[in-house]
Image: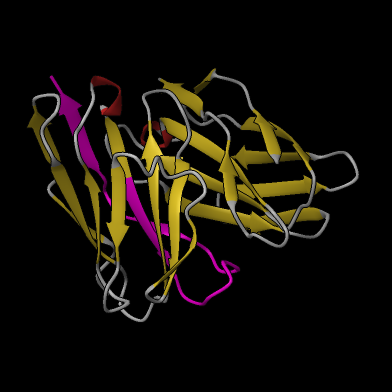
Amino acid sequence: GQNIDQPTEMTATEGAIVQINCTYQTSGFNGLFWYQQHAGEAPTFLSYNVLDGLEEKGRFSSFLSRSKGYSYLLLKELQMKDSASYLCAARSAGSYQLTFGKGTKLSVIP
Amino acid sequence: EAGVVQSPRYKIIEKKQPVAFWCNPISGHNTLYWYLQNLGQGPELLIRYENEEAVDDSQLPKDRFSAERLKGVDSTLKIQPAELGDSAVYLCASSLGVGGQETQYFGPGTRLLVL
């Protein structure tokens, strides 16, 4: 099985940079996903890492260290619309099941 | 391209009543998932279909929940009878291939309130 841990809430200022951490424990690992979920809406795909290192996509970047069971999502030049929950999810090898963390609620303030 | 479509968006029922949710995946997506999401929690998988076959239903409470995907396209999730604890958001997701290796794309969900 999988155990996913991420902070419950974070607050950051508009225009700043914020890093949301995620640690996972797994009996078989086949990739780490980040999703964004605005209140009352569907989770939307942000990024996917399966190899160690940093994946950059515009203002969002995601990092993975398989040896440490650790990932982070980096958001640059924060905008008010970035206020949302950010879900970390680890995929199991074999079953390919996604196990989600509880999500980190990010509040961007002026 | 249309995303995953779900209906209804909201449903309020009394306990012990039946309820059904419908999902139409992204066109061409062979794998379909039903998740349950409680407030302040991440989605939890209920069942995964590859085409019309349920390949992972280990977390579906089979005493009251059932699902079907008869033609390998749209799917229905049913609860009968509903209990107070079933109040949650029911999310449908789909991915392109089989085996669950591709990215999952989610629908807007059905928010269920059981009174």
Quadrant assignment for the N terminus of chain B: bottom left
Image-based side of A104 in relation to A82, left or right: right
Residue at image point 30% right, 22% down: B85
Question: Between residues A50 and A59, which one lies in front from this camera angle?
Answer: A50
> Could you tell me residue B103's position as x and y percent?
53, 64
Q: Is residue B113 magenta?
A: yes
Residue at image point 47% right, 25% down: A105
Residue at image point 74% right, 47% down: A63
| Residue extending furthest toward the front | B63
Q: State whether residue A68 is above or below residue A96.
A: above
**Residue A51 image-quadrant placement:** bottom right
Q: State whether residue A59 is above or below residue B87.
A: below
> Could you tell me residue A82's position as x and y percent?
42, 36
Q: Is residue A88 visible?
A: yes
Image-based side of A55 in relation to A37, left or right: right
Quadrant assignment for the C terminus of chain B: top left
> Could you tell me residue A58's position as x and y percent?
56, 55
Image-based side of B85 in relation to A60, left or right: left
- Marks counted in the figure total 0
Question: Between residues A51 and A73, which one lies in front from this camera angle?
Answer: A51
> Could you tell me residue B23's position as x and y percent?
24, 60
Q: State whether residue A67 is above or below residue B48.
A: above
Question: Between residues A20 and B56, which one lies in front from this camera angle?
Answer: B56
Residue at image point 42% right, 76% down: B30
Identify the coloring.
secondary structure
Span colored in magenta:
B91-115
Q: Is residue A50 magenta?
A: no
